[in-house]
Amino acid sequence: MTVILLRHGVSTSNTAHTLAGRGSGVDLTERGAAQARAVADRLADLPVEHIAASPLLRCRRTVAPLAERLGLEPDFDDRLIEVDYGEWTGRPLHELVDEPLWKVVQRHASGAVFPGGEGLAQVQVRAVAAIREIDRALAAEKGRDVLWVACSHGDVIKSVLADALGMHLDGFQRIVVEPASVSVITYTPTLPRVLRVNDTADLSALKPPPVQADSPPAGAPVPGGEIGAADDADNGNAERTDSF
């Protein structure tokens, strides 16, 4: 059984440098919508038989073009939803870097619990359980290998990849998951095998981004995922985008 872990496209919160979390009103930017269409072009020729996704709008928008191309109805699963960042939700990133918890998230993720929200260890448990349960259900239903897609958020995908790699959650910030990237895991009877990580077919993220006053330290992972360069069609500039 093989799952394609798809991260949503660039969102309005990404370009605003805020921590979206589960806040309402966060949609894809024009660039994010274009990424969703490009993902559909990349995956439409594959024998994908099932699409699961976070119920948040940015994930719904990301899978919509692919679902239409394949004639599938997405299954929106609450276990794939974004981290509950509690009191951090909606706050600018440049404020959060001064919080003591920021360093915990970077260095001791398994001990990070967001005030009024959930812990990253809880996130990994629910997300991995969801992926494996859906995988088992498809295997039982089809009686053969099935290729399927799960669309979620940066930290959620990174936690699933860390589990598949046999990596402690404290090291998951070493994994990069950019907007609209795909990562691929095959679950065998004995162990998971990671086939792709952060595959975007685009190397533009390797270009140094412009320095902005409200951005986190260059190259620093942020809650929700990684920072990468993206050509934001809303303003025509190369932006550093987080993965919320």
Image (spheres, rainbow, N blue to C red):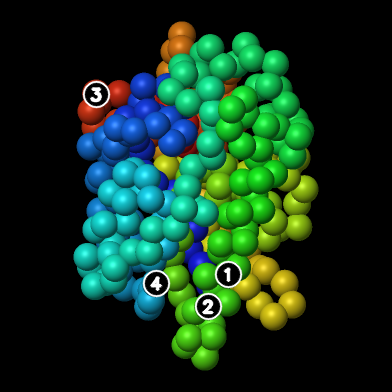
**Whether label 1 touches label 2, CB < 8 Å:** yes
Element class at badge 2:
helix
Q: Residue furthest bottom?
A: 143
Residue bearing the label numbered 2? 137
Give the labeled residue for mark 3.
Answer: 235
The span from disc 4 to disc 1 (Cα, nearest Å) is 13 Å
Of 141 and 170, the residue lying toward us: 141
Q: Of the residues under marks 4 and 3, which one precedes in the sequence?
A: 4
Q: Position of residue 115 (x, y in %)?
A: 62, 25
Looking at the image, tell me whether mark 4 or mark 1 is earlier in sequence order. 4
Tell me the kind of residue under disc 3.
Asn
Mark 1: few/some/many CA within 10 Å (<14, 14-19, 20+): few
Among the 4 quarters of the image, the one containing residue 44: bottom left
- Residue under pointer 1: 133
- Looking at the image, is mark 1 or mark 3 earlier in the sequence? 1
Residue at position x 55%, y 50% from top? 157
Cα distance in 3D space between marks 2 and 3: 44 Å
The image quarter containing residue 28 is top left
Residue depicted at 74% across the width and 77% down the height:
190
Q: Give amino acid for label 2.
A: Ala
Label 4 amino acid?
His
Q: Nearer the viewer, mark 4 or mark 3?
A: 4
Q: Check if mark 4's residue and mark 2's residue have beta carbons within 8 Å.
A: no
- Check the image and report above or below for 145 versus 109: below
214, above or below 11, in the image? above
The residue to which callout 4 is attached is 50
